[in-house]
Image: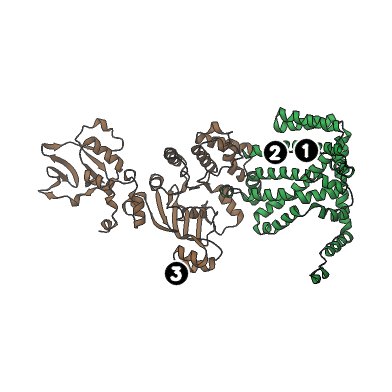
Chain colours: A brown, B green
Amino acid sequence: MSVVKIENVDIVFGDNKAKTLPLMDKGHTRDQILGMTGDVVGVQNANIEVNEGEICVLMGLSGSGKSTLLRAVNGLNRIARGRCLVRDGDIMVDMAKCDDATLRHMRTRRVSMVFQSFALMPWLTVLENVAFGLEMQGMPKAERLKKAREQLKMVSLDKWADKKPDELSGGMRQRVGLARAFAMDTDVLLMDEPFSALDPLIRSQLQDELIELQKRLNKTIIFVSHDLDEALKIGSKIAIMESARIIQEDTPEQIVLNPSTEYVERFVAHTNPLNVLCGNSLMTPLAQLAVKEDRISVSDDIWLTLENGKLASVQGPKGDIPTARWTPETILANVPENTVFIVPANIAMRDAVELRYHSNMFMVLEDKDQCIGILNDHNFYHALLGKHFGREEVAA
Amino acid sequence: MNWLTDNKIPLGAWMESFVDWLVSAASVFFDFISITLETIIYTLVDSILWAHPLAVIAVILIGVWFLHRNIGLLVFIAASFLLIINMGYWIETIQTLVLVVTATTISVLIGVPIGIAAAHRPWLYTMLRPVLDLMQTIPTFVYLIPTLILFGLGYVPGLISTIIFAIAAPIRLTYLGVSKVPSELIEAGLAFGCTKSKLLYKVELPAAMPNIMAGITQCIMLSLSMVVVAALVGADGLGKPVIRALNTVNISQGFEAGVAIVLVAIMLDRICKSPATKNEG
């Protein structure tokens, strides 16, 4: 069920929209339009659908329009054309066209926001800051302070309730920002580079906390980031933006495997594939292995035999090599070395590397009880060196 | 050259006929303002003077204690008032204080809303700026004359002149404070569903409060600097002995009245300033 639906949205900053919009349609670039009308194109023809429980990451460098697009979802930025629909119960409200009362209703009950620079009110205590949005919902004072205290407990800041924001560290302040947004009990959460201003350790810790919270609360989150590693870590869907346009929208794995343009490829080149890729996108498929006398050759002296598409045995130079089935619950210490693991096709690359490290052997991938390929060192090096996203290769 | 001086543009005459027209057309209105303000000031002055000076000082000291909790300040204030009583300027000091407080209150009541309105409408501030500059630069004696004609002798023309001179400070600083509110705080306010008035009272004004307080402090000091000028049109207070000393070339009287004014200035400054700086921290 889609909760946020962005349809053909254009956002233009300036007073000459009547002139700018036709120029955009004619395919003029952002710089050309700036020169011709003085207007700045913030977002051009954006389309995204975010479903319930998804974390959609808008990724791009500064100035790419990602924050601009995010602000259209709660109406902070007015859109020039198109629709930005947000679910309100059974209906979808167009944030661009609704009246002030509806807009306020959506902002207090349906969409809340976390800011890059925290945006806490310096004259309010931490507790009052968390209760700020609740006050706008019209909740009575005692009740909202009680609820704010619960939210603070959730981000383990209850001991800091009566402090002012400037007495807190950056990481703590953003936890207050998170608590303030979560306190609203809205379905949709907008996060504008919430962790960018924090140092790397705190950032990764807060990302983990967010993932934990999300598991419990199942919000629909639109998250803006300029860090692809962060996007890959928390996103269930990533939309990459470049100069006001969305140039690729896909799952994290597809972004890493099939970058659609050179621009995305440059981003992907600096990421760590361990957390993103799955076995079946790394493997050497069975079809590519040499077959001799009904046996499949893994290397010069190791062979596989299949029965009805299922792995029957693995033969090495000194006879059969033991095999073991791996599941995420398997305790590696209980499995002897030099065992060939049979693993599910969607095994995470990190797990696969761990298995390889333990067993010293290649792995056999299975999907629906069918052997589909093998994973060996060559596949890992291939992924780690970023060889897998040569677009020509994918096309071939 | 002769031609230039011969054909004098009657700027002054225009102003005079404008003031004459005001007097004839709106004298009821100006009389009403005059009487109202005069009643307020006289009531305040009389009720404070009715009490024993030491009781008044005690009340002030208690108030200051709750504001600042600073023993040194209390000692200074007590000593200053005792010195003023000793010099024989108690009544004049109270008259001056009432004039300053009334002028400041009216300036803030008018100035802060104007400052807020200007911060929300850039065109309004563009129009206001030359007016504010004019009000602060034009010599006070110049508009003392029309205020004298419109409001008669006494406290009120002094008060009005003081307000004209001092009101620019709260307007400018409120404008500065409200227009300087960080945009992310405004965005946060809107994102959590503030209405326009909630945004003003819950976000913009608290964020601008340090600046507004600075504007009020400045307004008080500017008002105090007008006491001598106000005395020229008959406003009672510490300005009167200064004028009298000037006219009679009386060094000792002038010095003592001057010391009293300085003491009042320092007291007001100390009392007003620290809450503002506390807010900033």
Q: Is residue B84 visible?
A: yes
Q: Which mark is residue A26?
A: 3
User: Residue A42 placed where, x, y %?
Assistant: 49, 59
Dividing the picture into quadrants, the one containing residue A166 is top right
Instruction: Determine the CA span between mark 2 and mark 1.
Output: 16 Å
Location of mark 1 (residue): B262
**Between tags 2 and 1, which lies in front?**
1
Q: Is residue B63 left or right of residue A103?
A: right
Q: Is residue A90 visible?
A: no
Q: To which chain does the residue with label 3 belong? A: A
Mark 2: which amino acid? Lys
Counting labels gives 3
User: Label 2 crowding class (10 Å Cα cut-off): few <14, some 14-19, many 20+?
Assistant: some
Q: To which chain does the residue with label 1 belong? A: B
Location of mark 2 (residue): B273
Q: Are marks 1 and 3 on the same chain?
A: no
- Residue at (72, 54) in percent of width and height: B132
Q: Is residue B214 left or right of residue A90?
A: right
**In the image, residue A275 above or below residue A62:** above
